[in-house]
């Protein structure tokens, strides 16, 4: 069974930094685009950042210049470095990835989420 597992969330003061990690496990032939999303209470889930297998990135306007995304294809992992955090960044952060299985199926797999709270 393929799983994506996030780690690195927690409580941080405004202006602080956190680094989220997402590790995929299971039988995966390849991972295409990997992404990070977030969902705040009472709001819809929104894209934070994504990165293609080749390293092309995309960011939400609200995090441009503060967040960076990277990936390690050999480790089947992605990372979200979050700097200059603001209270409005508080949310549950989810990672996902579009995978190709060895029987040629393409599907998107989501992690279970990790809480990020920005508060003094």
Image (cartoon, grey):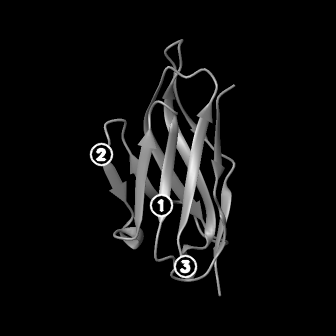
Mark 1 or 2: the one toward you: 1
Residue 88 against residue 21 in the figure, above or below: below
- Could you classify mark 1 by the number of other residues whose Cα lies within 10 Å: few (under 14), some (14-19), or many (20 or more)? some
Residue 117 in view: yes
The residue depicted at 34 percent of the width and 54 percent of the height is: 58
Q: Position of residue 91 (x, y in %)?
A: 62, 68
What mark, if any, has residue 56 been given in the picture? 2
Q: Earlier in the sequence, mark 1 or mark 2?
A: 2
**Residue 108 at what x, y percent from top left?**
54, 36
Give 82 or 108, whichever is nearer the viewer. Answer: 82
Neighbourhood count class around disc 3 (C-alpha, 10 Å): few under 14, some 14–19, many 20 upward:
few
Q: CA distance from mark 1 to mark 3?
A: 16 Å
Instruction: Residue at 61%, 73% (x, y): give it.
Output: 90
Mark 1 or mark 3, whichever is nearer to me? 1
Distance, label 2 to label 3, CA atoms, is 26 Å
* Residue 88 numbered tag: 3
**CA separation in Å, label 1 and label 2:** 16 Å
- The crowding category of the residue bearing disc 2, from other C-alpha atoms within 10 Å (few below 14, some 14 to 19, many at least 20), is few
Q: Is residue 111 above or below residue 75?
A: below
Depth check: give the residue in front, 84 or 95: 84
Q: Quadrant of the N terminus?
A: top right
Residue 37 in the image, given as x and y percentages of width and height: 53, 56
Does dot 2 land on a helix, a strand or a loop? loop
Residue hosting label 1: 81
Q: Residue furthest top?
A: 103
Can you say which quadrant of the picture contains the C terminus?
Answer: bottom right
Residue 45 is at least partly visible in this image = no
* Dots 1, 2 in contact, CB < 8 A: no
């Amino acid at each position: 069974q393929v799983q994506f597992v996030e780690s690195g969330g927690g409580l941080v003061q405004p202006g602080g930094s956190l680094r989220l990690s997402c590790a995929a496990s299971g039988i995966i032939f390849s991972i295409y685009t990997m992404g990070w999303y977030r969902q705040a209470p009472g709001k819809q889930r929104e894209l934070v950042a994504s990165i293609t297998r080749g390293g092309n990135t995309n960011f939400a306007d609200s995090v441009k210049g503060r967040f960076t995304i990277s990936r390690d294809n050999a480790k089947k992992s992605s990372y979200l470095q979050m700097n200059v955090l603001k209270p409005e960044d508080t949310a549950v952060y989810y990672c996902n990835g579009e995978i190709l299985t060895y029987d040629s199926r393409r599907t998107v797999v989501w992690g279970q989420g990790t809480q990020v709270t920005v508060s003094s």
